[in-house]
Image (tube, grey):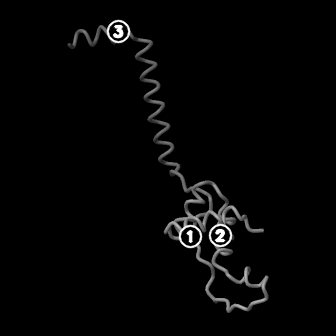
Amino acid sequence: MVDQTLVEGLKNALTKGESLQSAMQSLLNAGYNSSDVEEASRNLQAPTTILQKTGAQVMRSSQPAQQVSEYSGESTGPSKALIIILIIFLVLVVSSLVGILIFKNEVINLLSKLF
């Protein structure tokens, strides 16, 4: 079943001059399920569902409904190497701060001799 909220959201965006692709991407960014957004898009693009209720016949296009992107809801995220480097950097910063706190007096004496 098509979520009419999504269909209405797409219609509103289209009436404001936004492209279907950007309207769909906005819904995806808002957290809607990609399959639901795709289904709403297909429903919006297919006039046959409305006309079938009245008994009218419409020639269907052989082209599939427009698909926004390869968005699957999964983010690629940073690589493992980047995460490891950031963790090592964080450990070094935290250990430096702890060392400064432990040896506060010695650090103050050293800095006062230098400046």
Specify the quadrant of the image occupied by residue 25: bottom right
> Is there a contact, CB below 8 Å, between mark 1 and mark 2?
yes
Quadrant location, the N terminus = bottom right
Q: Secondary structure at mark 1?
A: loop
Question: What's the CA distance linking mark 1 and mark 3?
Answer: 61 Å
Question: What's the CA distance linking mark 1 and mark 2?
Answer: 8 Å
**For the residue carrying disc 2, how many other residues have a C-alpha within 10 Å: few (<14), some (14-19), or many (20+)?**
some
At x 42%, y 23%, the residue is 96
Instruction: Tell me where residue 36 appears, x and y as whole percent.
Output: 69, 65
Q: Secondary structure at mark 3?
A: helix
Quadrant location, the C terminus = top left
Compared across the picture, whether 36 is left or right of 98 comes to right
Which residue is nearer to you in this view: 62 or 89?
62
Q: Amino acid at mark 1?
A: Val
Sequence-wise, the earlier of marks 1 and 3 is 1
Q: Amino acid at mark 2?
A: Glu
